[in-house]
Amino acid sequence: MGATLLEIKDLAVQFFTYQGTVRALEGVSLTVQQGEILGLVGETGCGKSVLARCVLRLIADPPGKITAGEIRFKGRDLLKLGRREIRQIRGNEISMIFQEPMSSLNPVFTVGNQMMEVVILHQRVGRDEARRICVDMLRQVKMPDPEQVLAKYPHELSGGMRQRAMIAMELACRPDLLLADEPTTALDVTVQAQVLSILEELTRQSGAAVLFISHDLGVIAQLCDRVAVMYAGHIAEIAPVAELFASPLHPYTSGLLQAIPRIDEGKAALKVIPGAVPGLIDPPRGCRFHPRCGQRLAPCDREVPAFLEPAPGHCVACHLYASGGRG
Amino acid sequence: MEPVIEVRDLVKYFPIRRGFLGRRVDWLKAVDGVSFAVHPGETLGLVGESGCGKSTVGHLMLNLLKPDRGVVRYKNLDLSALRGPEERRVRRHLQVVFQDPQSSLDPRMLIKKTVGYPLEVNRIARGAEAVARVKAMLAEVGLNEEHVYRYPHEFSGGQRQRIGIARALITEPEFIVLDEPTSALDVSVQAQILNLVGDLQQKRGYAYLFISHDLSVIKHMSHRIAVMYLGIIVETARKEDLFQEPLHPYTCALLAALPLPDPTKRRVRASLQGDVPSPVHLPPGCRFHPRCPQRMEICSLRAPDGLEVLPGHWTACHKYGN
């Protein structure tokens, strides 16, 4: 693993809606090292997509607003950049793959048109050179007939092919960081397997770091180097992948791991996390997980737990570790 | 034991219409010869990728769609031959829980009405009697009695799915189709619903057809499993047998493609090339042959017949042909 590529510090994001202020992210800190795949896992509405969008400053303002924190990419704070500067970074140094390829590709332009636009804008090359780069990229994502695919419209491709075209497009400018927001959730398992192996192969080859967002712990376990677990707008735990699955520290993480049915283990009743994910307009005070936590302590409903590092590289935000740790 | 419900050689094609006159230009072969039986107290898991026809099978079994060929037998009654009051009398024994609890509950109906409606329609109970039964049912699925005077939007996704389950169970059915009941739910809530569905079966002995695209959920819930691919069942077996010794190359590929939630068991992922073909233009011969890593010459020529390769373990693949 190399140096720190992206550092997010104490990020807070709020959305101002008619129902009230949604406190989507609070005190979120994490780093992405050069060349690593960092998994970001959490349930619906926990803020994982908001986090990725913040990095590219894609939060619509209004209603959203980044109210605190900084996002340092190669030392520069992305939140302080002007519009022109951030546009230089988007799609060039940092690019993003979304969940639904049909809605992130423009239906009225051909795949080639959209791909070449990115390359021409950022790499300042002519059309012929751009076309050559695109064909080469499509070949790398194992697209059959890359020349023909360039002339096709998104609706003419299958879901898996569209997502592969997206990957090709996003990697065409050789970004240092790829934000992948549930890129395989809309795909069937056999196609998901193809897309994941292409994504892994290409990013490892080019040395790009990936922030891989998913709700699927299986995908996370198979792909990532480190994992950050999010719950209701907070980071609960960050650890190397093997350690997270072998010895999770946060009660939410261990609850989640026990709640998934598995094919490699025998049948017992699934362990359950009682209750449901809270709304973020009026989230629980203190630790946001405390109403569902089986190991609740006295300070849990009053104080937000500090982020501790009980084992090297393994961070957790939970009062259970406050006395023994350095906090 | 006599099966509760049995389907034999079920076929359902949907016409594809084009143009101003709605001329039929082709057929979408959603279900193309499917046979199986579900016994009392048993869960049959039906697994397959999107568009393979698994939901259509569920609809056919409930008589929500009429089959083009083949029969659905509920206790020796041919469902598609039933009409009017006869059909209604049978239907209360066959119920369904849908995938999306958001869209399968009427937003303008009180829970009292939503869950009590089957009682009214089937003339089982009315008025105060019906409300009492709804309350008892809600308690059984883990909701409160006072929830009867609420609307669906006041509930979380998991609670809404509990309401869907209550509505399905209130007529005391024998057979329930669970059509991806947890696909719209988060992992922590999914576990609650799966446990509830399993507990209810143990208590009441329901027969389930559990439809899902998720092999790990299917394995957790089912006694027997049928694997579907493009409108046909390619393999049926007891759960233990299927996972220990998958026979059909497609089943093997599905198992290999499933990402295990264990970083110490990383593996080569892409076991299959290409996408699922369209159910309109089916490949000749075995439907799986264009993607099959073990295809032989015969595979593109002739569709394989279903064979009982091991006791209770059926598959349709030329590998086991002779």
Image: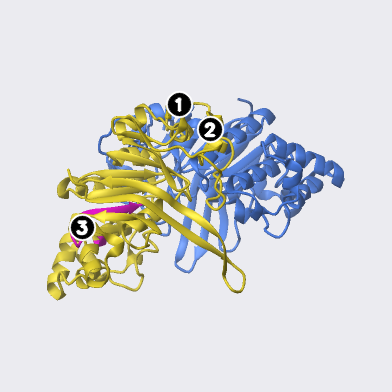
Q: Amino acid at mark 1?
A: Ala
Report the residue at 51% width, 46% height from top: A185
Q: Amino acid at mark 3?
A: Pro
Does the magenta-highlighted stretch encompass residue A280?
no
Question: Which numbered disc, 2 or 1, marks the residue closer to the eye?
Answer: 2
Q: Colour of chain A?
A: blue
Q: What residue does disc 1 label?
A: A242
Which secondary structure lies at badge 2?
helix
Report the residue at 26% width, 72% height from top: B84
Which secondary structure lies at badge 1?
helix
Q: What residue does disc 2 label?
A: B298
Q: What residue does disc 3 label?
A: B173
B127 lies left or right of B104: left
Report the Cα–Cα distance between label 2 and label 1: 45 Å
On the question of residue A264 being in view, the answer is no
Report the residue at 27% width, 66% height from top: B82
